[in-house]
Image (cartoon, grey):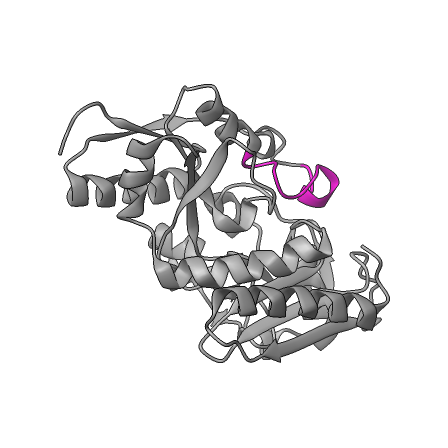
Amino acid sequence: MSGAPLRLATRGSPQASTQAAAVADAITAATGRPVELVIVETTGDRRSTVPLHTIGGQGVFTKEIQLAVLEGRADAAVHSAKDLPTTTPDALTVGAFCARRDPSDALIGNRFDELPAGATVATGSVRRRAQLASARPDLGFVELRGNIARRLEQIPDGGAIVMAVAALEVLGMTDRIAERLPIDRFVPAVGQGCVAVECRADDDAALAALGVVDDVTTRHAVEVERAYLAELGSGCSLPVAAHVTDVGLHVFLAATDIITPGETPVVFRETLTMSGVVDDDLELARTAADRARQAVGWSG
């Protein structure tokens, strides 16, 4: 199979373009169809020094890429699944949830138990701040933005930065990791470690091409995680997390995105046994979200 190139829209950062190139190579290897990348600058890229939770969280890395597909400048949009809003534009569909890389968070600098009292941790994620503060209320936090290379230059003296292991895997930089954080205590963001690819819902040729990189197991897991997030009506700018493992569905919610130094935040953390039946697991996720909201007294 060959023909006109399949055009994949992606951000231009090293991580985004590298993971998009991997998708492109996999499609070409399986179908023979040539694939080319279309680089798109997003709001999140243009405002790289502004904390994510102040500029809208989810959507700031995806809207412009989706628009490239809707306007016909690209055939598909490649995203880190954790950046993808739970509401998909009517004309688009997720044609592939690619097989997941390591979904866990990692510390770079010092290991968690080796951080001295009052140490500073750099992260732009309120989810990560809430989880770390619930275990170590003595820690202080500062913002962390920029591409991977820039973030690795911002390790506080005596402290650490937090990054997704998958991002480091994409760029071959896992040697910088001091410690992978356990998923049951530090639940990853919804979709973390997965690459999602959207296309127009009526584009049969694009859907067929993306079908060769769609991973059934990852799709089930990420759709369940996204159901939890959708029920809360929140985005990645809020302290919420969900992740599916062989053990079950791990969920997390904090009462607030404001972390007060020295105080332990009110959080909900639970692991639920899944049935493996899609509809049942989606309902389980939605029920868990309701229970989480009630437990922390958060109206959403």
- For the residue pair 138 and 210, the one nearer the viewer reads as 210
Q: Residue at x 69, y 42 (%)?
A: 51
| Residue 136 seen in the figure | no
Q: Is 121 left, or right, of 95 in this rendering?
A: right
Is residue 109 placed above or below 211 in the rendered structure? below
Q: Quadrant of the N terminus?
A: top left
Q: Position of residue 92 (x, y in %)?
A: 48, 34
Q: Residue at x 21, y 23 (%)?
A: 4
Q: Position of residue 22 (x, y in %)?
A: 29, 45
Is residue 56 placed above or below 232 in the rendered structure? above
Q: Is 231 left, or right, of 96 in this rendering?
A: right
| Residue 144 seen in the figure | yes
Number of numbered tags placed on the structure image: 0
Check if residue 206 falls in the magenta segment.
no
Is residue 140 placed above or below 274 in the rendered structure? above
Q: Position of residue 228 (x, y in %)?
A: 63, 61
Task: Give the quarter of the image for residue 23.
Answer: top left
Q: Position of residue 155 (x, y in %)?
A: 57, 56
Q: Residue at x 17, y 45 (%)?
A: 30
Q: Quadrant of the C terminus?
A: bottom right
Check if residue 57 falls in the magenta segment.
yes
Q: Residue at x 72, y 51 (%)?
A: 233
Main SS of the magenta segment? loop
Task: Give the quarter of the image for residue 161.
Answer: bottom right
**Which stretch is magenta?**
50-62
Is residue 231 placed above or below 79 in the rendered structure? below
- For the residue pair 94 and 247, the one nearer the viewer reads as 94
- For the residue pair 254 and 218, the one nearer the viewer reads as 218
